[in-house]
Image (spheres, helix red, strand yellow):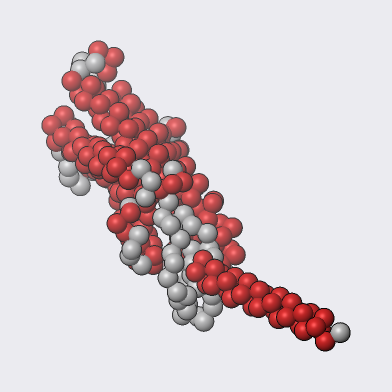
Amino acid sequence: MEGYGLFLVLLVSALLLGFLSVLFALVWVFHYREGLSWDGGSAEFNWHPVLIITGFIFIQGIAIIVYRLPWTWKCSKLLIKFIHAGLNTIAMILAIVSLVAVFDFHNAKNIPNMYSLHSWIGLTAVIFYTLQLVLGFAVFLLPFAPVSLRASLMPIHIYSGLLIFATVIATALMGFTEKLIFALKTPAYSTSPPEAIFVNTLGLLIVIFGALILWMATRPHWKRPPEQNSKIQQPNGGTPEGTEEESTMTDCSNTDKSDVEFNSEAAARKRNLKLDEVGQRSTM
């Protein structure tokens, strides 16, 4: 793997920033806010930032780069796909629970729903993330989609995943600002009280975490290499699955083998033709 040392540094940094972001979220809701509960009060709302940061940002970020971890390249591609899908499923569940907490809190306090840009973009991100996950299961995990369909949808799948991830981070930053403006009255947010500085720092941690994830996920020399193992028959008797998060959908080993056999046969025919010509000339 080219740049293995740099990759490890970025990976460890991203993991530390991710864990630190989750820790900051917990400190925020327990030290500066009312803690966590499920009673329709402010403590129920606090589940929203905690679950969004834990699932929709941290876990989703790890799911994005799971194919890039070099020590997983010896594992079955299908196993890594299940890990990728499982992490994204956990992130989706936590995001949905966080939305339920917000709507439940708003309804209990008679606060209007879906009036801010934060709520519009946030709900849109959850909907598209759910669609991305469902289509990913149907096209890339189940063995029924044709290889040509997977090959054509793979660039869209990768781009939309990165776009949703970046959108979630931007939406979280809007949510931080919105919450602090509404919650901090005395002292006001504009006076930079300790809670405001603490949450702003949390926002910076999330931005750096996201930047590291996006950088690792877009370096072509850190892609998972195509598998060189032999052809695996699908349960439906079709062509091999052969598709992964960041590779083409061709069986490289079988293609190379057939090319070698074809070239060998062609060379043998040429040699036979030359021998025949020599034999004919010698008899004339």
In the image shown, does 274 or 149 lie closer to the viewer? 274
Q: Name the residue: 39% across, 67% down.
A: 78
Furthest residue in direction right, as rendered: 284
Q: Is residue 181 above or below residue 74?
A: above
Which residue shows up at 50% across the image and 46% down it? 159
Question: If the image is split into quadrants, where does the C terminus sit?
Answer: bottom right
Residue found 54% across the figure and 68% down from its top: 256
| Residue 197 falls in image quadrant | top left
Quick one: which residue is furthest to the top in this view? Answer: 191
Left or right, 77 with reference to 206: right
Q: Hey, which quadrant is residue 190 in on the image?
A: top left
Whether residue 35 is visible to the viewer of this picture, yes or no, is yes
Task: Look at the picture and state if 263 lies above or below 33.
Answer: below
The answer to whether one can see residue 183 in this image is no
Q: Position of residue 76 (x, y in %)?
A: 36, 67
Place of residue 275 in the rendered image (x, y in percent of width and height, measured from the top left): 73, 80
179 is higher (above) or lower (below) than 281: above
Give how far across and how far down residue 123 sits, in percent: 43, 43
Residue 126: x %, y % from top left: 41, 47
Q: Nearer the viewer, residue 219 or 184?
A: 219
Asked whether 187 or 153 is in front, the reply is 153
